[in-house]
Image (cartoon, rainbow, N blue to C red):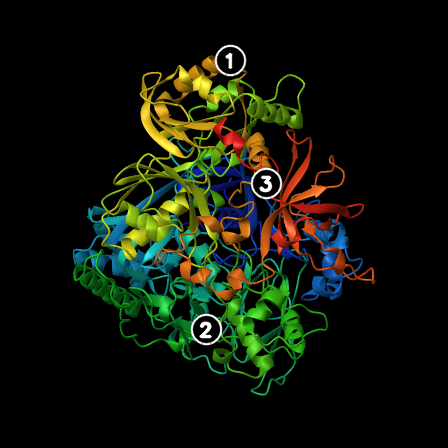
């Protein structure tokens, strides 16, 4: 059975391929080439959604990406659910299943429509004013209620199983927009020998030409036929050119510096059964020498009371439905226009058998060729016409009209016309979003009555309707001129050379004022009280909302946008911006150019999160890095924690142990015998070259000239502002080679800083940097018996205290394998760090475990490591530091090379504020109750700061940075940064708790073995 609203001939659909689809559980039949929107209209379905706030019935307004109403959810299966798709962009395929959104229990009867009756309670910004009490009710009551009552589609409950790809590409000329201007530009650029990429968001290239009638009965059949033939001939030529890449279904959504344009290509979204090896979407990142923007223009709706009913749409949408999809959008149409283009739609609908009730023109005169053609066809025409209101519940049924004079007074009586289709056209708004995103300037044009591209900031040109050129012949000429100039400029420069200034814009051809229309709301002096005139269909913003915003003192267009939500969300003001600006300008008694324009946010047309993520999902989103010992630790029951991208063993629980018991056991083992710790995640950088020591002298705060080969030194790295950035052990393994270790999280930033200074500041230094973090596995053996464990495994190295003292390094072999052995400790015990190639790490680890079994060797994790280092007062960057800490603040003033002429951060350290009284200093805190554990991050208060007024909050003098229970001391310990902390040792301070203040005594930051006697075992 054929669809009841389909023409017998014409269109760009394949009548031999019927397609089954369903909407809200009802089955329909469409044709190949249909969109969901055209398929529904062909079956007489006009009601496609409910509005965001008021739940008003909504139907189709536009025919492309600018559609604000017909947002649907498409389901492929239980795991593939995509909300908020525009029905005008959903290509029909056999078996497509779609649902309407934001309604309950059904689209035809929505309980939420009561919001429309209660709309006086929901003006612009009502949530800022209404829900202020009780104070805490917003999160648990008001916000959930508002979100449940308003909104768009629901997010999927399941993870997206599809694959999304990325691709990088370079070209001479990128043309964005596949309409007549874009195709003409691509043809001219290709003829100039350029490598060209042409992208367009639609499934077919042609843009406005796709809406031209392909029937010989039209008044403009000769022009139409010539346009269709030109398009087919040109596209065939482009497809045959190996230097041209055509990307249909591809939306350019972001314009970034240096002519980088991001494009979202929908690869399989239109297929009923996509191949499993194909990605669903592909994100192209295109670097172009030259860019031509041919993004077209969007027809501007009119603002009048009741302008949002189903059956009210843009004239261009009806024309596209008729000529591209062979769909008759109504039986009796009325057109209201401020632009000649709507007359063409009226004529073509009339020739298709649609009754034209009236063409109402807002302008005082209608004397163009299209208006004359309408009169010749016998179509009723009325000038100085305005809409006072509409009727109809789920579809428009009548329109109230009146004629107004220049002073907005009625000329005669109002009259009502019955219709089931109301078409409107307020002119065309150039699509300038990409030009604006590229930081290009915009200028108001009085002829176009809109903003057009002015001075570009990148190597880009605009062509065609997006810069106010509408006449067909002029559009083709404009595109060809832009494409040819882009190809010539691309050939004249290399992509890798210093970028020249922005591309000069070619002169704008004469523009047709008959296409311009006007900006702003229609005058409505006789509108019925309470009638809503919508400016933004997607966000339910009316003229009353804009009027309220201006009454309440908002004059900045950006503030008005946020207060009323005009032009926000997925619509981004495509159909609303110019009308909103026009209305606000009227209210403020300013010109639109004075009001300004809001920012075009990326993406102007919505793009799926999957396209942004690409392959960066699951483990590829946040890659998991594991050490060579990871699997062994997992087999032995380790509980892991994430440290940056690394998985690190946090503790090794035995049967019945919780974390606290396991950590206490591990700490006792290290203090009494020996413990084994995987430190492979430490950053490791080889600094090699004749100037390696000079480089380190300039970079690190320490002095390095005196560091002998075979010795280590604790290194402190500062930022230029003098604050601590990183630390680690630095070993001199040869005259021109230093092995630098960094914190686990600091490896990348330290290497980047080194490279930055080496390449930009000290280019004369002969130094080479190599990251070796992944090459060396580090096995830390700590405890008084650690030397005995290693004795039988190590060759070529004397492990005695005299031969290998603390802070030494030596090359040798362990288990017959090459090794770099450090005598260092982060626990305060006798310690060694065995560095072996990562491929042999597990073999060496297991050998150490076997050799240490007789000595009670115990693997320990990061939690025990934290306790052991805190007992010794050793700091951790990022825990005892917060970006405002100097070396002296944490007791590392001894590490500064005072006699060095310079190093990064030295001048900043000399500032008086860096040594002024009152700076926070690292100290220890001991609670009166040894079992009481302070919470990390807690504020510390001095007793003298307590005020007699209970409501006055004392100013904290510091905070707790680390807090643990120490098994060695059998009590809690904490480190804290306290103002003048070292001078407060012995004082009693307090830490506010949930129940009461906790008294604490300030102590040295070294709690265990303060003399360091245990370092030598």
What is the spatial separation of the Cα atoms under label 2 and label 3, in whole angstroms? 82 Å
> Looking at the rendered structure, which numbered label has been put on residue 853?
1
Of circles 3 and 1, the one toward us is: 3
Mark 1 in CB contact with mark 2 (< 8 angstroms):
no
What is the spatial separation of the Cα atoms under label 3 and label 1, in whole angstroms? 31 Å
Q: Earlier in the sequence, mark 3 or mark 1?
A: 1
Q: Badge 2 is on which residue?
A: 339
Of circles 2 and 3, the one toward us is: 3
Of circles 1 and 2, the one toward us is: 1
Residue extending farthest to the bottom is 407
Q: How crowded is the residue under tag 2: few (<14 C-alpha within 10 Å), some, or many (20+)?
A: many
* Near-viewer residue (318 or 692): 692
Q: Is 492 positioned to the left or the right of 943 in the image?
A: left
Residue found 54% across the figure and 16% down from its top: 856
Mark 3 in CB contact with mark 1 (< 8 angstroms):
no
The percent coordinates of residue 459 (x first, y second) are: 28, 64
Q: Earlier in the sequence, mark 2 or mark 3?
A: 2
Note whether 401 is above or below 313 in the view shown: below
The percent coordinates of residue 387 (x first, y second) are: 60, 73
Q: Secondary structure at mark 2?
A: loop
The percent coordinates of residue 720 (x first, y second) are: 42, 58
Q: Secondary structure at mark 1?
A: helix
Q: Badge 3 is on which residue?
A: 1006
Residue 544: name its quadrant.
bottom right
């Amino acid at each position: 059975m054929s669809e009841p609203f389909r023409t017998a001939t014409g269109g760009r659909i394949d009548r031999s391929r019927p397609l089954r689809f369903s909407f809200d559980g009802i089955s329909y039949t469409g044709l190949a080439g249909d969109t969901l929107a055209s398929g529904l209209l062909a079956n007489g379905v006009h009601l496609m959604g409910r509005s965001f706030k008021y739940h008003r019935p909504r139907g189709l307004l536009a025919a492309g990406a600018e559609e604000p109403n017909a947002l649907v959810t498409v389901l492929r299966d239980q795991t593939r659910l995509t909300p908020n798709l525009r029905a005008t962009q959903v290509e029909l395929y056999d078996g497509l299943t779609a649902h309407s959104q934001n309604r309950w229990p059904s689209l035809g009867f929505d309980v939420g429509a009561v919001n429309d009756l209660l709309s006086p309670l929901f003006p612009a910004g009502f949530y800022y004013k209404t829900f202020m009490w009780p104070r805490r009710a917003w999160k648990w009551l008001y916000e959930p209620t508002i979100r449940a009552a308003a909104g768009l589609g629901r997010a999927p409950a399941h993870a997206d199983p599809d694959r999304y790809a990325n691709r990088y590409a370079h070209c001479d000329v990128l043309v964005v927009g596949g309409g007549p201007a874009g195709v003409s530009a691509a043809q001219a650029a290709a003829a100039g020998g350029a490598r060209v990429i042409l992208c367009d968001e639609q499934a077919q290239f042609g843009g406005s030409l796709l809406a031209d009638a392909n029937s010989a009965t039209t008044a403009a059949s000769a022009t139409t036929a010539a346009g269709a033939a030109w398009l087919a001939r040109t596209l065939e030529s482009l497809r045959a050119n190996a230097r041209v890449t055509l990307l249909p279904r591809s939306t350019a959504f972001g314009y970034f510096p240096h002519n980088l344009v991001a494009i979202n290509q929908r690869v399989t979204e239109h297929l009923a059964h996509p191949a499993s090896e194909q990605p669903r979407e592909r994100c192209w990142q295109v670097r172009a020498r030259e860019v031509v923007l041919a993004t077209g223009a969007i027809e501007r709706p009119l603002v009048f009371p009741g302008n949002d009913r189903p059956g009210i749409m843009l004239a261009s949408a009806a024309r596209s439905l008729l000529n591209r999809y062979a769909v008759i959008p109504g039986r009796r149409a009325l057109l209201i226009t401020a632009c000649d283009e709507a007359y063409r739609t009226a004529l073509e609908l009339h020739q298709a058998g649609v009754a034209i009730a009236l063409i109402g023109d807002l302008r005082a005169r209608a004397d163009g060729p299209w208006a004359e053609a309408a009169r010749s066809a016998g179509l009723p025409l009325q000038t100085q016409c305005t809409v006072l209101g509409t009727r109809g519940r789920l579809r428009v049924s009548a329109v109230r009209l009146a004629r107004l004079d220049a002073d907005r007074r009625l000329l005669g009586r109002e009259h009502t016309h019955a219709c089931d289709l109301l078409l409107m056209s307020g002119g065309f708004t150039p699509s300038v979003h990409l030009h604006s995103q590229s930081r290009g300037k915009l200028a108001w044009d009085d002829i176009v009555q809109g903003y057009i591209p002015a001075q570009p900031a990148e190597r880009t040109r605009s062509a065609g309707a997006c810069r106010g050129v509408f006449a067909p012949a002029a559009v083709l000429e404009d595109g060809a001129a832009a494409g040819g100039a882009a190809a010539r400029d691309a050939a004249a420069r290399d992509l890798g050379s210093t970028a020249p200034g922005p591309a000069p814009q070619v002169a704008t051809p004469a523009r047709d004022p008959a296409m311009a229309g006007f900006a702003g709301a229609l005058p409505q002096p006789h509108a019925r009280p309470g009638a809503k005139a919508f400016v933004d269909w997607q966000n339910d913003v009316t003229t009353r909302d804009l009027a309220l915003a201006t009454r309440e003192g908002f004059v900045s267009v950006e503030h008005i946008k946020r207060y009323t939500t005009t032009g926000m969300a997925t619509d981004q003001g495509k159909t609303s911006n110019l009308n909103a600006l026009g209305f606000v300008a009227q209210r403020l008694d300013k010109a639109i150019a004075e009001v300004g324009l809001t920012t075009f946010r990326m993406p102007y047309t919505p793009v799926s999160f999957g396209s942004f993520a690409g392959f960066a999902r699951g483990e590829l989103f946040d890659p998991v890095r594991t050490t060579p010992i990871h699997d062994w630790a997992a087999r032995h029951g380790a509980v892991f924690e994430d440290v940056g991208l690394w998985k690190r063993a946090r503790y090794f629980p035995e049967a019945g142990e919780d974390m606290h018991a396991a950590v206490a056991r591990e700490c006792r083992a290290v203090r009494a015998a020996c413990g084994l710790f995987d430190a492979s995640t430490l950053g490791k950088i080889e600094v090699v070259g004749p100037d390696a020591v000079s480089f380190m002298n300039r970079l690190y705060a320490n002095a390095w000239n005196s560091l002998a080969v075979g010795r280590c030194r604790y290194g402190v790295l500062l930022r230029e502002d003098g604050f601590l950035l990183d630390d680690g052990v630095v070993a001199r393994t040869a005259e021109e080679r230093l092995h630098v270790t960094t914190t686990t999280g600091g490896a990348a930033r330290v290497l980047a800083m080194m490279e930055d200074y080496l390449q930009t500041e000290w280019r004369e230094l002969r130094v080479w940097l190599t990251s070796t973090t992944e090459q060396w596995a580090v096995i830390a053996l700590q405890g008084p018996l650690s030397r005995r464990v290693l004795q039988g495994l190590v060759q070529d190295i004397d492990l005695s205290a005299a031969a290998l003292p603390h802070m030494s390094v030596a090359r040798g072999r362990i288990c017959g394998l090459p090794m770099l052995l450090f005598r260092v400790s982060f626990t305060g015990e006798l310690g060694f760090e065995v560095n072996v190639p990562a491929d042999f790490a597990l073999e060496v680890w297991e050998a150490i475990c076997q050799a240490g079994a007789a000595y009670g060797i115990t693997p320990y994790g990061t939690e025990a490591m934290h306790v052991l280092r805190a007992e010794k007062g050793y700091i951790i960057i990022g825990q005892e530091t917060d970006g405002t800490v100097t070396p002296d603040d944490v007791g590392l003033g001894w590490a500064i090379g005072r006699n060095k002429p310079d190093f990064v951060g030295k001048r900043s350290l000399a500032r008086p504020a860096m040594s002024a009284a009152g700076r926070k200093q690292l100290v220890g805190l001991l609670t009166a109750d040894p079992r009481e554990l302070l919470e990390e991050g807690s504020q510390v208060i001095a007793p003298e700061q307590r005020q007699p007024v209970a409501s006055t909050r004392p100013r904290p003098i510091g905070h707790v940075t680390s807090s643990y229970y120490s098994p060695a001391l059998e009590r809690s310990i904490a480190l804290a940064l306290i103002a003048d902390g070292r001078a407060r040792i012995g004082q009693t301070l307090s830490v506010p708790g949930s129940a009461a203040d906790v008294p604490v005594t300030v102590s040295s930051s070294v709690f265990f073995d303060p003399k360091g006697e245990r370092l030598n075992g």
